[in-house]
Amino acid sequence: MRTALAPWLAGASGVFIVFALLLLDWRLVLLALPPIVYLAIAGMRPVPAPVLDVVREVSRDRAGVGQEVRVTLRVANRGPRLDLLELYDEIPRELDVAAGRPHVALALEAGEEVTLKYTVSARVKGVYALGPLVARNSGASGLEYEELVVPIRTPLSVAPPLEDIRRAKVQPRRTRMWMGQIPSRRIGPGTDFWGLREYAPGDETRRINWKASARFDRLLTNEVEGERSGDAVIVLDARTESLVGPLPRSTTEAGVRAALALASKILEGRNRVGLIVQREVLDWVYPAFGRKQLFRILDALIRVRPGGEWPFDHVVWVLERFFPRNCQVIIVSPLLDREAVETVEDLAARGFAITIVSPSPVEVERAMYADDPTIGLAYRVLRMERENAVSALRRYADVVDWDPREPLAAALKGVSPSPRHR
């Protein structure tokens, strides 16, 4: 293949010849000869096409945001000598090169092998692919080259950071019959003391309260509060109109972090957790227990990108038809439109227990601008409007107004852990 220089040289020769004909000055033809001779000599020696064996290795195929991944690329020349070989390993634009470089120019002898090493880290979660490798061998004249695209791709999954909310008291408000860690306010299998009752034949000896029995001169047995589990469904609002701020620090990415932290926390209590994502399509993960369920939810969250114009009230339709009745609904949304607020009111009217975790779009947008009196005034006005909207929603749900620049655990301190029963 020809480089961009070859047409320029041919064009320059043509211009000199045209001027020589127009001006009838044959000396101008002499100026056209050097480019023509240079092009002719360059064409006499063809540029060999690269014949390469390529192996790419990564230190890990799953990483977190900001976590470094070491990449090793081994390239072996299986063809003739390559005088000027450029190697460029394509990387997604969401990845930053922390060390080394994915691009090199060198000469490679026949049978010789070269190793490229570099380190990348991701600014935002997602599923990426390293590659392909582009190899270009240029001739000594700089007029011709042969290019080879090696279609070798290496997948890399980048997970969002996990917020530490271990001390937050987040749990489903309504319990099921399955054993768990939520106090059911009923007598049953558990660990928390409930009260005393008269000893009955068949009671376990270890449940007898010997101090109370000695005091009242009759056998008394301890009763404990039963602990059960519940169902929770996390609804993540990832629509286009809910996106505020640059993607790595946007309300959508903050919502993904919150959804992952809440799922992890609730699953630790041996509860069932499901997920609904509102974006280009309506995705969901049906409630289940355990660590495998956490990985299912994580895989779904990794692929979340803001987009779509689905009406938010579709969530009500999905919840009523495909998810357990009376489950705890945790909505993660910046609450930017009236439709989201109306959906909360509708869910409350249908009897769902609702918690809202709202990454504040006002705080995200405020962090994008420098201090300015005009911006400060606009911030105060928007802040008051948001506080009024949040106050109105607190009639239907627990609302957590979260500044994504602060830890989520601090914002969750106001959530009431007390279960309500019907």
Image (cartoon, rainbow, N blue to C red):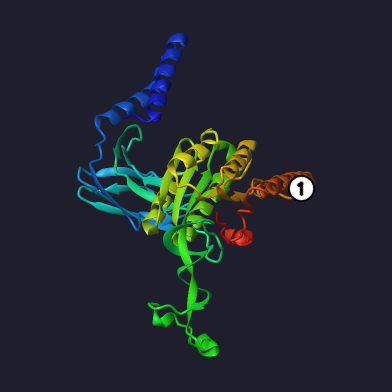
- In-image side of 282 versus 140 (left or right): right
Tell me, yes or no, if residue 183 can be seen here.
yes
Quadrant hosting residue 348 = top right
359 lies left or right of 227: right
Name the amino acid, label 1.
Answer: Arg
* Identity of the residue drawn at 41% across and 55% down: 294
| Image quadrant occupied by the N terminus | top left
Q: Which residue is mark 1?
A: 380
Q: Position of residue 245 (x, y in %)?
A: 60, 44
Tally of marks: 1
The quadrant holding residue 29 is top left
- For the C terminus, the image quarter is bottom right
Left or right? Give the position of 381 relative to 244: right
Q: Position of residue 251 (x, y in %)?
A: 58, 46
Q: Position of residue 84 (x, y in %)?
A: 32, 43
Question: Which residue: 25% across, 52% down?
Answer: 113
Residue 118: tell me if it is visible.
no
Badge 1 density bin: few <14, some 14–19, many ≥20, Cα 10 Å:
few
- Quick one: SS at disc 1? helix
Q: Nearer the viewer, residue 118 or 127?
A: 127
Residue 136 rendering spot, x and y as whole percentages: 32, 39
Residue in the foreground of this view, choosing between 278 and 104: 278
Q: Nearer the viewer, residue 20 or 140?
A: 140
